[in-house]
Image: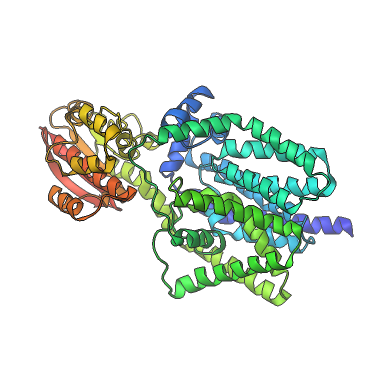
């Protein structure tokens, strides 16, 4: 009977992996967006020193382990879009059996199949399963980490403790924010199992983990020191919509604000009622029932989840991070297991109805909604295709104040020259002499930076003569007579485009008191200045808007 049971479980898990694969292949042919192309840019650098150097001098936010893995993956299998995505896909599919083997420590074998079923159809996990980023890997590691906690608590087996320590060391080196998960885990275990006979060894092992993470702490502190000098930040103001956005993405069939924090209020209509509100509120109630009626093991999961969520919320309120769902993806499997636990409090009929409802709506959303593919297409590939359609060549010039550092993933030797100019990265460095005059740099040190920016934006002159010369010498002068210069303003950046008069009126009538206001104002000034500098030596021939991207085509005089 046991042999038959194992065969049955193997068949069910194999079937879930197959269904999971079919759902995840929906996005396998989506082009890379900026963050993914940035991963490739870093991973193609020399291992390990060039990768580390770039992360610590330019990127200033990520830890290196994922890029090491991707580096060797590219060396072995190449860098086609599909090949790159397969690495994440493997870890995504491995998470399905992994969450079962975690769940079976908490429930009987049949009940433990609910969590992998929910994960198989989870829209957010499906969308990120082929993302060329560290999210699939970090979620897989989070499942293993909690699995080894239960192994150690139940068996007092030192091998499990060693495995747990290794995973908890790897997690922060793979994803910067994962240390919060490790810290939440330590607090939760000590709180729930304070009287456990083998807690002392667990504490000692975590002291070893902390020691092994010293380079991580030094790196993060270095990032903090450098980023504290930045003049600008893209971190938005925290709102309660951010929290509901997390729950929507993790628990609802219909995802929202996939790539950023949820900023807009939620409106009730037929679609959001059935695809968002009903599944979210039912899932939250199930989590509540799980915590209320269950044992220490479930309480441990709940504490890890809520402590992690609490820390991230505090960081978001203090504008340390953006409350984007993907940054918290490592708590997604724990939330699904809590939903699994809550379902055990209800009759079989309700369980079947809920799971069928959730899975069918998720599958419908994944197979019918093309917004994810379209948003990724618009990020890089649409612009490349548009530029190629203009028949520009390597004697022409493209100015891309966003994504110029990564556009080479889709270009060839005949593509126009595209020197790197990342607007936000350039503008946020107070002593950047390509952008700011010496006097302005001094003022940034001694005066209110928002007031300095306001004066720069309202000035009839360029941001500086340094900036004027930089744009001319790098982008305009190298282009020969009658050849073309194309200025590309991407999606969200295009929203700040306005005339000089409109910009001045806007700044005069609004307080420069938020990150977004200052950033939008100086970006608009940045784009206007580039436009005027180009026209000193070129004629504007055409302006086009294609998929929210704005293209200004000039011909050199």
Is residue 163 shown to the viewer in this render?
no
Residue 540 position within the rendered picture, expressed as x and y whole percent measured from the top left? 13, 42
Direction from residue 374 to residue 22 in the image, left or right: right
Q: Which residue is drawn at 41% across and 49% down?
A: 376
Q: Camera-side residue: 264 or 259? A: 264
The residue sitting at 46% across, 72% down in the picture is: 271
Seen from this angle, which residue lies furthest front?
A: 446
Q: Nearer the viewer, residue 117 or 462?
A: 462
- The quadrant of the picture occupied by the N terminus is bottom right
Confirm whether residue 516 shows in the render.
yes
Residue at the image point whose x is 54% and y is 72% from the top = 278
Q: As displayed, is residue 43 above or below residue 99?
A: above
Number of numbered discs: 0
- Residue reaching furthest to the right: 1
Out of 255 and 287, give the one closest to the viewer.
Answer: 287
* Rendering coords of residue 120 (x, y %): 62, 57
Colouring scheme, one of rainbow, by chain, secondary structure, one colour = rainbow
Q: Quadrant of residue 250?
A: bottom right
- Residue lying at 49% horizontally and 27% vertically, measured from the top left: 51
Coordinates of residue 98 in the picture (x, y in percent): 70, 50
Q: In which quarter of the image is the C terminus?
A: top left
Whether 526 is drawn above or below 370: the answer is: above
Give left or right: position of 306 versus 464: right
Q: Which of 294 and 537 is in front in this view?
A: 294
- Taking 524 as reference, is 437 above or below it? above
Q: Quadrant of residue 160?
A: top right
Left or right position of 555 against 220:
left
Q: Position of residue 304 (x, y in %)?
A: 65, 52
**In the rendered view, does 268 fall on the left or right side of 109?**
left
């Amino acid at each position: 009977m046991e042999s038959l049971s194992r065969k049955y479980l193997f068949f069910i898990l194999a079937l879930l992996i197959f269904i999971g694969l079919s759902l995840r292949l929906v996005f396998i042919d989506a082009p890379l967006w900026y963050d993914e192309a940035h991963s490739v840019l870093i991973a193609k650098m020399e291992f390990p020193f060039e990768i580390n150097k770039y992360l610590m001098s330019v990127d200033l936010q990520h830890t290196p382990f994922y890029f090491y893995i991707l580096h060797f993956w590219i060396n072995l299998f190449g860098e086609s879009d599909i090949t790159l995505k397969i690495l994440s896909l493997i870890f995504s599919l491995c998470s399905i059996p992994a969450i079962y083997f975690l769940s079976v420590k908490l429930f009987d074998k049949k009940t433990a199949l609910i969590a992998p079923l929910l994960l198989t159809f989870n829209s957010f996990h499906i969308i990120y399963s082929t993302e060329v980023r560290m999210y699939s890997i970090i979620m897989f590691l989070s499942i293993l980490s909690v699995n080894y906690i239960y192994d150690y608590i139940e068996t007092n087996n030192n091998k499990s403790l060693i495995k747990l320590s290794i995973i908890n060391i790897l997690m922060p080196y793979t994803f910067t924010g994962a240390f919060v998960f490790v810290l939440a885990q330590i607090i939760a275990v000590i709180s729930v199992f304070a009287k456990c006979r083998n807690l002392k060894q667990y504490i000692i092992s975590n002291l070893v983990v902390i020691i092994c993470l010293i380079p991580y702490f030094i790196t993060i502190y270095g990032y903090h020191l450098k980023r504290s000098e930045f003049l600008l930040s893209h971190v938005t103001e925290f709102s309660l919509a951010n929290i509901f956005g997390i729950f929507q993405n993790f628990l609802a069939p219909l995802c929202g604000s996939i790539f950023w924090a949820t900023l807009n209020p939620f409106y009730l209509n037929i679609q959001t009622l059935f695809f968002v509100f009903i599944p979210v509120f039912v899932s939250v109630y199930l989590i509540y029932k799980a915590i209320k009626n269950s044992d220490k093991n479930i309480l441990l999961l709940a504490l890890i989840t809520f402590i992690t969520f609490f820390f991230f919320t505090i960081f978001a309120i203090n504008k340390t991070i953006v409350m984007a769902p993907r940054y918290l993806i490592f708590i997604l499997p724990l939330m699904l297991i809590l939903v699994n636990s809550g379902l055990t409090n209800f009759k079989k009929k309700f369980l079947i109805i809920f799971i069928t409802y959730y899975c069918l709506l998720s599958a419908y959303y994944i197979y019918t909604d093309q917004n994810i593919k379209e948003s990724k297409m618009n990020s890089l590939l649409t612009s490349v295709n548009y530029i190629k359609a203009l028949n520009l060549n390597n004697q022409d010039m493209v100015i891309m104040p966003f994504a110029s550092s990564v556009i080479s993933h889709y270009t060839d030797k005949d593509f126009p020259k595209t020197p790197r100019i990342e607007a936000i990265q350039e503008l946020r460095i107070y002593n950047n002499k390509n952008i700011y005059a010496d006097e302005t740099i001094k003022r940034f040190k001694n005066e209110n930076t928002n007031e300095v920016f306001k004066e720069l934006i309202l000035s009839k002159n360029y941001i500086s003569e340094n900036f004027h010369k930089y744009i001319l010498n790098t982008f305009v002068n190298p282009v020969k007579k009658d050849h073309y210069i194309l200025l590309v303003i991407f999606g969200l950046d295009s929203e700040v485009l306005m005339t000089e008069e409109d910009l001045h009126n806007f700044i005069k009538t609004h307080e420069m008191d938020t990150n977004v206001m200052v950033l939008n104002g100086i970006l608009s000034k940045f784009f206007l200045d580039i436009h005027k500098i180009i026209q000193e030596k070129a004629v504007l021939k055409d302006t086009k808007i294609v998929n929210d991207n704005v293209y200004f085509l000039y011909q050199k005089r």
